[in-house]
Image: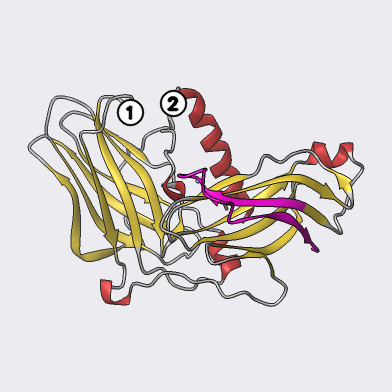
Amino acid sequence: MKKYLCLLLSTCIILMSGCAKSPDTGGTDIPKPEVEPTTETVTESAAKPLDDEVTVFDTEDYALKIKSTDVSKITEPTLYAQCTNKSKDMYIFYMESSFIDGVEAPTLWMYESEAGTDEETPIGFFMDEFEKLGVKEITDFEMTISVYEESLDNPPLDQQTIHIFPNGAENAKVYEHETAEGEQVICDTPEAKATVIECGMDELGEYSVWLWLENKTDSEIMFTSSDEYLNGRKAADPSFSWAVGAHRSAYTRITWYADELSSMNITDVDEVSLELHVFDSTDLEKPDYFKQEVTILP
């Protein structure tokens, strides 16, 4: 099943990284993608060694250590890991979930460590949304990493959640978004908040509404949309649904593709209306946190 579901995840990540963002995605189970593993040694040109390297795993069979960081480019932060295989079997290191300064930071990173190897590999992130959000400094990487023997279809042998602090733990902080001029808050309740950061067409002819989503509760919540209209006309369903973990935030988008816009003869969008639904995804018996029609004026 993972082989098929991974295609969906990969599509989401590519869209997000190519346009700006996008679900621990927020605490949900992520299908494990079959991506090409990194096997070559990387030269640390702009990497800064950690004062204390972080050991994720260290057993008689395998080890994974984070040794340095490169946060010189805010949109492409990179960690450098040492992957060691002391056995005659293959081990796979896999990123289950990741956050940077509390913001979802999707990555398809995995590494196949062959028997008897000891190699360095980069863990890269694409965070173009940081430019739109005005983030100037990265202070905290939070990652949950698992190790598997031979295949991701096997149960994980171990799983650890770690933090990497490029400037020291004392300087770590969670990003908090303050609504700026031109942004539109379309939902603000004690449990959740949704803010439209920007809207517009991209070079592919796709129209997107970019959202900053906040979960103020102790449980995972889901944001979904339905009954979407563009310029007062019923639009194709963009199938927007995004999970955000407890006390987490995410930057994502609702997108209508070029062929859909063409079929509607839409070359520019003056108004978007939709029903926004926000609810506890772990307890569907709870009353909705928010469910009403909202209008977005680009």
Residue ID for mark 1: 152
Q: Is residue 172 left or right of residue 60?
A: right
Q: Residue at x 72, y 73 (%)?
A: 182
Classed neighbour count for the residue bearing mark 2: other residues with Cα under 10 Å, few (<14), some (14–19), many (≥20): few
Q: Which mark is residue 103?
A: none
Residue 175 position in % (x across, y down): 46, 70
- Rate crowding at label 1 as few (under 14), some (14 to 19) or many (20 or more) other CA atoms within 10 Å: some
Q: Amino acid at mark 1?
A: Leu
In this picture, is 154 found above or below 177? above
User: In this orientation, which residue lies closer to the viewer: 151 or 236?
Assistant: 236
Residue at image x 43%, y 29%?
A: 34
In the picture, residue 108 is in which quadrant? top left
Query: How many numbered callouts?
Result: 2
Across and down, in percent, residue 102 comes to 42, 62
**Secondary element type, mark 1:** loop
Residue 33 percent coordinates (x, y)? 44, 32
The span from disc 1 to disc 2 (Cα, nearest Å) is 9 Å
Location of the C terminus (image quadrant): bottom right
Mark 2: secondary structure: helix
Q: Which residues are magenta?
A: 274-298
Q: Which residue is mark 2?
A: 2
- 296 or 298: nearer the eye? 296
Q: Is residue 96 left or right of residue 201?
A: left
Q: Quadrant of residue 113?
A: top left
